[in-house]
Amino acid sequence: MTLAAWLKALHIAALAVWAGGLLALPGMLIREQRLASGDTHTLWQHRVSRFAYDVLISPAAVVTIGSGTALLFVTWPLQGWMFVKLAAVGALAITHIQVGRIIDHIEAPEATPSSLRTASIVGAASILIVLILWLVLHKPTFDKTLFPSWLLRGPGQSDLLFSSTLTPT
Ligand code: HEM
């Protein structure tokens, strides 16, 4: 297997854990908020959420972004869809941080994080994950004029992006 294939396998395995976790965890948090606080079951469930976030989902986010960045250098897919994908990944990272903040809030004694806020985070994460998957699997063509000119210039001011000499990925 080539380096690109290994990196892509790692990327897909890590993103499955990250995306799956971001979709599942808010549901668990809404359930925690509805249960009476302080009982053993709630405390145990809260520990599971904290463990999932700290030990599985956050490291998976780091591996997804690291392997994706390495893939950028190996496959060089610098096309319009990749820039839109990176913007969507940035927004997904913000929803990841929001999930962490909700877990922190639940730990505070006066915690009252609303279910609506948690539900809107899972809604945003779902839309972003579907958008990212559509972008990478469909690789739509975007008009060059949609992007600022500085983004389209490579080292030495050459017009690297959207160049017909690039190998299609
Ligand atoms: C900073 C974060 C990320 C970077 C830099 C990145 C970059 C890349 C690169 C360069 C490729 C190879 C593209 C190709 O060979 O055509 C790729 C593939 C892929 N990425 Fe990402 N990615 C990131 C995050 C994500 C996320 C969050 C998801 C999904 C939620 C995702 C889903 C995929 C999928 C499904 C593929 C395989 C596409 C294919 O083989 O056709 N990536 N990524």
Image (cartoon, rainbow, N blue to C red):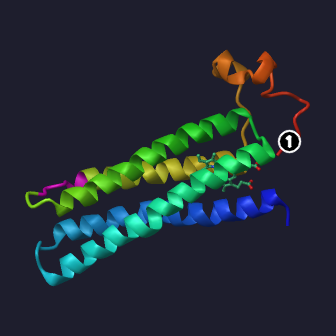
Q: Which quadrant is home to the N terminus? A: bottom right
Which residue is at the far left?
A: 110
Q: Which residues are magenta?
A: 111-116
Image x and y of residue 26, in percent:
34, 62
Vertical relation: 122 (above or below) 161 = below
The answer to whether residue 112 is left or right of residue 160 is left
Residue at the (20%, 56%) spot, across then down:
105
Type of amino acid at the residue the image marks with label 1: Pro
Vertical relation: 42 (above or below) 99 = below
Q: Quadrant of residue 67?
A: bottom right
The answer to whether residue 73 is left or right of residue 56 is right
Q: Is residue 112 in the magenta section?
A: yes
Image x and y of residue 111, in percent:
13, 57
| Principal secondary structure, stretch drawn in magenta | loop
Residue at the (55%, 52%) spot, across then down:
130
* Near-viewer residue (62 or 13): 62
Q: Is residue 33 in the magenta section?
A: no
The answer to whether residue 13 is left or right of residue 100 is right
Q: Quadrant of residue 82?
A: top right
**Label 1, on which residue?**
168
Q: Quadrant of residue 164?
A: top right
Image x and y of residue 107, in percent:
18, 63
Image x and y of residue 75, in percent:
79, 46
Vertical relation: 149 (above or below) 65 = above
* Near-viewer residue (90 or 35): 90
Which residue is at the far bottom?
A: 40
The answer to whether residue 143 is left or right of residue 90 is right
Label 1: element kind: loop
Which residue is at the far right?
A: 165
Residue at the (72%, 39%) spot, across then down:
140
